[in-house]
Amino acid sequence: MHRRIWTIAGAIILVLGASFTLFKKVTSIGVAPEPLTAAKVSATVHQTHIPTIFMPGWGTSANSFNQMIGYMQEQHTAGKVMRINVDWLGHIHVYGRLKATDVNPLIQVTFSRNLANTYQPQVKWLNQILILLKHRYGMTQYNAVGHSWGGSALVSQLIRYGNDTRLPRLNRMVLLGTPVDEGANHAKDLFSNGKPKRPTRIYRQSMADAPHLLANRNAQIDNVYGSTDGEDTDNAVPIVQAQSLRYLTAGRIPNYHEILLKHMNHHQIHTTVRSFKLVTKLLFN
């Protein structure tokens, strides 16, 4: 009897393990690339050759931005040209090719290790990816879209390493439900200038490194956050955690803007047509 129970238990574990492996593989691949040419681009969008990098949040990979990228390709406003995956050991793998003639090219970043209790490894990996893209493909400017901790990694990388001459310069960044100081939960936790009253260790480091932002002073940052049913949170990230970026950019990034999306929760802010249209407008209109 016991042997039968252990056999059944072993079979269940094998099935669950195989299912998890398959799920990880499927969610890491992403939508099929469709490079966009000048002949096919929509007349309603601005054409550039500046790549846009998509950074997923905690626990997600390609599935985080599959829908948004698919929407942009269907609307002929942008086209995916490349996926970059960071494996379990931190090795970077590039799939696809970035060409100088690509119109509004999209680069989807995925991480095999995406369930850690911090986004700090993603900060270092993102920095390595940007150096690689400049060195190997001549990318001198970039756009970036990040959801949740993916946006946090974008912000930390920009502040910590943004003045490194090996890096391309930021053109535009769109943050979606991004916590910047996770110690703040209510409006009373910030001073009137946006500085957190009890900043976390990561935020204190960002304050020390904030002068590095001057290297990207010509960039534009759009900080988009949601509110559900009039609340001061999107049910995952309190609005003040996103607004704490305001203090860091003040006097350093003149083109910094905040956008509140009402009746929008943390998941919807990167998976609904409403958000797809907004990000498309911010990047390409």
Image: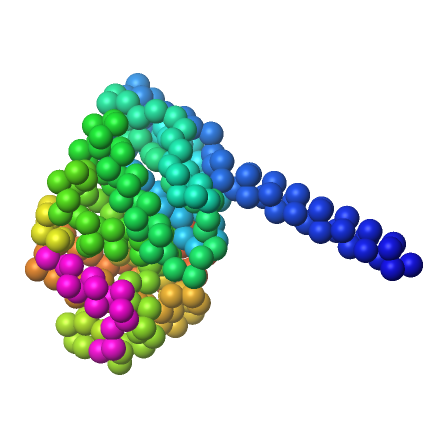
Residue at position x 33%, y 56% from top? 120
| Placement of the N terminus among the 4 image quadrants | bottom right
- Residue 67 seen by the camera: no
Q: Quadrant of residue 244?
A: bottom left
Q: Total of numbered circles in the picture?
A: 0
Q: From the top left corner, tell me how far across and down residue 19 is, in percent.
A: 65, 45
Farthest right residue in view:
1
Residue at the far bottom in the pictured view? 188
Q: Residue furthest front?
A: 3
Q: Quadrant of residue 6?
A: bottom right
Magenta segment, principal secondary structure?
A: helix
Expressed as whole percent of the image width and height from the top left, the position of residue 195 reads: 19, 72
**Image location of residue 183, percent across then percent down:** 32, 73
Q: Which residues are magenta?
A: 197-211
x 25%, y 21%: residue: 101
Instruction: Look at the image and name its color scheme.
Output: rainbow
Could you tell whether 101 is left or right of 85 in the image? left
Residue 123 belongs to magenta span:
no
State the residue at coordinates (24%, 23%). 100
108 versus 150 height, above or below: above
Direction from residue 95 to residue 175 in the image, left or right: left
Position of the C terminus by quadrant: top left
Please give the name of the residue rendered at 18% of the width and 77% of the height, measured from the top-left corner: 191
Residue 32 in sight in this render: yes
